[in-house]
Amino acid sequence: MGHWSELPRELLDEIEDLLLLYVDKVRVRAVCTSWNSHLSKMPNHQVRRLPWLLQSFENATEASHGLFDLSDKKFYKLDLPEAQGKLYKGCSYGWLATIGDNMPIGRCISSNSPDIHLINPLTRAQIQLPPRYTFADVTGYIADRVGEEYAILQPRSMALPVSYYASAELVNSVWMRKVVLSSAPSNEDCLVVAIYGEHGDLAWCKCNDKEWKSLHWVAEYNDIIFYNGKLHALNCNEELLVFEDICSDPNFRKIAELPRSVSSEGLYLVECTDGGLVMVMQFVKESGEEDSLTEKTYMFKVYKLDSINSTWVEVKDIGDDILFVGLNTSFSISSRDFPGFKGNSIYYTDYWLTAFTSRREKHACSDIGVFNLEDQSFELLPGFKCNPKFLWPPPVWVMPPSYY
């Protein structure tokens, strides 16, 4: 039998045409350089892709990254030193947003560095964004002033001084909550938007900017998403705001709100496969023994946007859709494209633990699983096994990008 590289090109094309899953198309290109060079880049709409779960493991002697593949329920080790020791702050279009810099193995809190990057986990490419001290809430930054690296502007409460000092750990971890992209950063019009600060403000930049620009504040923002080409922001009052053009006109308009207040710990905006927009509420409570308390999700609720009546309507059934929520820009896929996966469900991770705590807890990364909307049941993520003591920062969903 000849070498794999000698397989007739016509036969190789037929084999590739029969592969529907993204991971299988990646694997066939990895067989040999000859196959990889022959098989062309495929358009996004022709590729059925399951998201990966990006993980970072760290203990006193070893550190590594890896991707958990939902299709075969296996963990694949990933050489990604560019992200080592950094905190995850979002993931959009296959690009991971991070803050901090590389740290020695065994250190388990974020670096004090104000550096913010976009990292492609597959190619290891990096894009530097304006640093944390260029946000509007910072009046000064001195790296050597340990524990008081940042000088912060007076918050909205008049009871506090005009300015005060805050640690880099607090500012990087808690006051830098989430970063989303409007498109892949290869697009020159790509916008980067962040939820930041003590009171959940919004700021934006482009990849080649030197500083972040502020957007209007109404109430603390919980989640953001680019929907139909425009930035949509959800605040703690469950009000949905849309910014028409953040570059030229930072004004917004309110397009929906809940008729009554519903208290939840997590709020997510998700575009469904049919093009509709939903809001996902995550309800969390303390669980475990007194000396090892952790937070566990006990309920999700889903509300669909009724743009005609400017309100949110609770729904119990999202059809074949599977929603993926967490620190990532939330997204959906259809279970019809992936045999063996059940629709009307939510796959979730420990997003809000990193957004609202500045230190690594003993069992911080244990709230990962699948919620079934039909019977309100929970299950563990199939095939996912880890020791939460060494899983930090919490995993983030990564939607694989198109072929390069």
Image: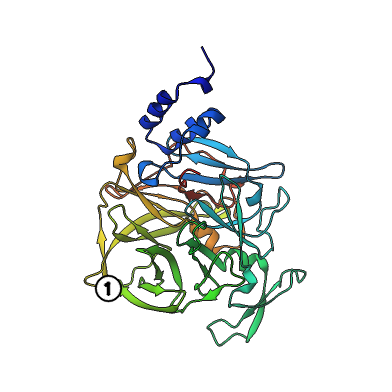
Can you tell which quarter of the image residue 46 is in? Answer: top left
Give residue 387's quadrant in the image: top right
Task: Look at 40% across and 42% down and name the residue there.
Answer: 49
Q: Residue furthest top?
A: 1
Residue at 58% over, 78% down? 136
Query: On the rendered structure, is 402 left or right of 227?
Result: right
Residue 363 in view of the camera: yes
Q: Check disc 1 and report the residue beneath it.
A: 259
Q: Mark 1 is on which residue type?
A: Pro
Question: In percent of the image, x 49 and y 32: which residue is there?
Answer: 38
Q: Is residue 198 placed above or below 383 in the rendered structure?
A: below
Does 374 sit left or right of 404 as displayed?
left
Q: Position of residue 352 (x, y in %)?
A: 49, 60
Which one is in front, 145 or 35? Answer: 35
Task: Report if residue 198 is visible in the image.
Answer: no
State whether residue 114 is above or below residue 363.
below
Please give the name of the residue rendered at 32% of the width and 35% of the height, measured from the top-left corner. 339
* Mark 1: few/some/many CA within 10 Å (<14, 14-19, 20+): few
